Amino acid sequence: MAKCPKCGYKLKFTDWKPNCPKCGINLNYYGLEEKLQEEADVAEVEHAKIQKKIDRLKASFVGSPLTIARIFLSVLPLGMLMLPLCKLSYTGPSFEAKGEAVNIVKVYNTVSSLDFDALTTLMRSGTVGKGFIGYAVSMIAILLSAVMLIVSLIAICAAMGKKGNIRNIANNTVSLTLAVVSAVFFMIFSKNIHSVFPDLFSGSLGIGAFLYIGALVLLLGINIYLTIHKVEVKYKPCDVGGIPIEEYLAELEKGTSIEELHERMNVILAEREAVRLEEANRKLAEKKAREEEEFARKAGKLK
């Protein structure tokens, strides 16, 4: 059976009225104000947590001129991938010499349409096979490097988190390492194939590969600098019922009862309301004084 929340009286089936038969309190609304205040406390604590995340996010992007520069340097390597990463040229007795510049789009299209069974067969054929191993590794490595670059760009959102800068450095290091691996294995591929077909094939790294690696070095450098010289996050002050959020949480950890905290909140809010009313009355008095002065000035002109 249900009990009265105030006096503990055991309610009967015949006690259908909203008031307790013993103490007379309204069973529907008893403690409602306290419950609403507790819900308001929870809402304000959650708001404070979200506000801190927003403040860190803002600092990650516009916390200083260097964080703004980091955004540019994070996007710059993507543009470098659109430039020629390597150049291939083919010649032969039965066809004219043909040159081809390869960028990241060409690499992606090649990998997506690659016949891996045929590539596996080529890999077993001596020097040519070693060359095509380098070819496969080079393309896969540059694609993974681009993926890690995009991950790094997204990770900027959490750069001001507990391990945000370390995460950025790790992502940039992996992306840079994969780019270097791609370049090295492409040269292995080019050298091996050229040694077998010196008059038919030649390959070289394009300007895009060097600029891409250079842009990644700059990005890694600025993330290392921001890790050493940390940007200060400017947190917006938040409170719970007038008590600063840090103090409120500290009091809860100390074991202060919620009732005591609510009493302090009531005092703070009452003081704020008194200040607000005093300010409103002052502004109203100033407005009234200006109106009376204006009225007297107009009355003087009429006379």
Image (tube, helix red, strand yellow):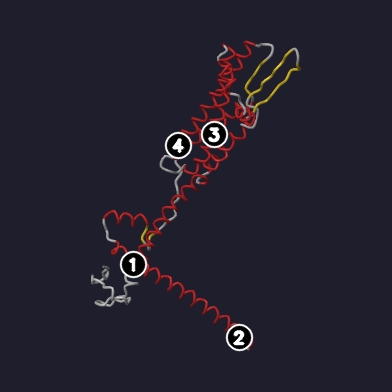
The quadrant the N terminus occupies is: bottom left
- In the figure, residue 10 lies in which quadrant? bottom left
Quote the CA–CA distance across marks 2 and 1. Answer: 59 Å
Q: Residue 147 carries which label?
A: 3
Q: Which mark is residue 69?
A: none
Q: Which of marks 2 and 4 is nearer the N terminus?
A: 4
> What residue is shown with label 1?
34
CB under 8 Å between discs 3 and 4: no
Q: Residues within 10 Å of mark 2 (few under 14, many from 20)?
A: few
The quadrant the C terminus occupies is: bottom right
Identify the element where label 3 is drawn.
Answer: helix
Q: Which mark is residue 167?
A: 4
Q: What residue type is labelled 1?
A: Glu
Q: Nearer the viewer, mark 3 or mark 2?
A: 3
CB under 8 Å between discs 3 and 2: no
Q: Earlier in the sequence, mark 3 or mark 4?
A: 3
Identify the element where label 1 is drawn.
Answer: helix
Extreme-bottom residue of the structure: 303
Q: Nearer the viewer, mark 2 or mark 1?
A: 1
Of 190 and 19, the residue lying toward us: 19
